[in-house]
Image (tube, rainbow, N blue to C red):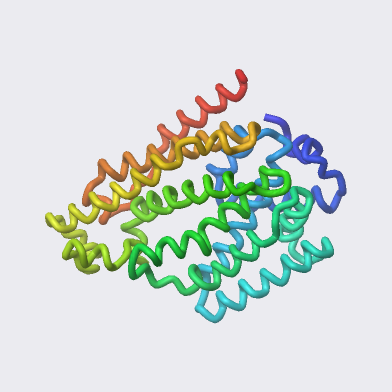
Amino acid sequence: MPGWRTTLTAAGISGSRQRADFTHAARRVARREPAPYAALRLLAAPPLQPWLAAGLAFMNRVDDVAETGTARRRTAGLAALAEDFEVAVRTGAGADPLVRAYAHAVNTRGMPVRWVSRFIEGAVTFEAAFDGFAAEEDFQDYLDAYAWPAVLAFVGLQYQGGPDEEQAAGWRRFVEAAQRVDFLADLASDLAEGRLCIPRARLAEHGVTRADLEQARDTPAVRALLDAERGLARTALDATDGLVDLAVPGLRPMIATMAELMAHQLAAVERAGVKALREDTGYGLVAPLRTLLRARGARTRA
């Protein structure tokens, strides 16, 4: 694996302040998201790594601001972050090295700013004031307004000039699968924190109450609801076939690994049954490590 300075040079990042900014952003990712950071460093082509590290750092920053403090504080924080980004992308200036690095990545890679604006606006509208979904339509609106732009604000940096229509649509399918799997895998902790990510209309369809889920009641109705949710997640995951081919060659090993790990987690959720209401369903250690090492070996041989 090339050293970080080598990856900066490979990406054409030469200015001392810019190199320091990207290093700051990468360190933030390494601390907050060690597993994705390791996958990025091991599997992505070196010229792509600084751009994607900055993208992931910015995506995390928006998420953190949208989930911290009161509703008023979240909204104010996101407005300030949007202003910081607008200044940085227009002038290259700003006090925050993470935002400067991301703005430089957006400009250099030609990422359409509208995806970033949609992401931040969606964070204000959907994430900062999240109170669950009334129906499936609300979940789809959440994907379109927040989750999809969030992912494109990150992985869209792989494409010079931003993703085309087919690529963007492929990532929309990926986002739906990822959110459905994540919501099921994190069901226990979400409920403990007062978040219910299954649309309320589907609880009503199965005759299940929120209390049934919060108290992890093992009833036929609860099992039927969870079976149906897992079926939707499996269908969404199957619809992501072909996504790897939409990625640029230098990122395909990483995307293939992400898809494999998502399938592994969904299989774990399926095995957990009602137990998923009592504790979150993690990846474990062995399977991700095995997947990562196998992908790294394939990339090295290629």
Going by the image, does 109 lie left or right of 56?
right
The location of residue 264, given as percent across then percent down, is 38, 37
Going by the image, does 101 lie left or right of 163?
right
The location of residue 22, given as percent across then percent down, is 74, 50
Q: Nearer the viewer, residue 293 or 176?
A: 176
Residue at 29% in and 48% down: 230
Rendered view: 250 above or below 280: above
Going by the image, does 280 lie left or right of 171?
left
Q: How many dots with numbers?
A: 0
Q: Quadrant of the image for the N terminus?
A: top right
Residue at 52% in and 45% down: 170
Residue at 32% in and 41% down: 268
Question: Which residue lies most toward the left here?
Answer: 220
Question: Which residue lies most toward the right here?
Answer: 15
Residue at 74% in and 48% down: 109
Going by the image, does 95 lie left or right of 40?
right
Q: Quadrant of the image for the C terminus?
A: top right
Rendered view: 158 above or below 211: above
Q: Nearer the viewer, residue 227 or 288?
A: 227
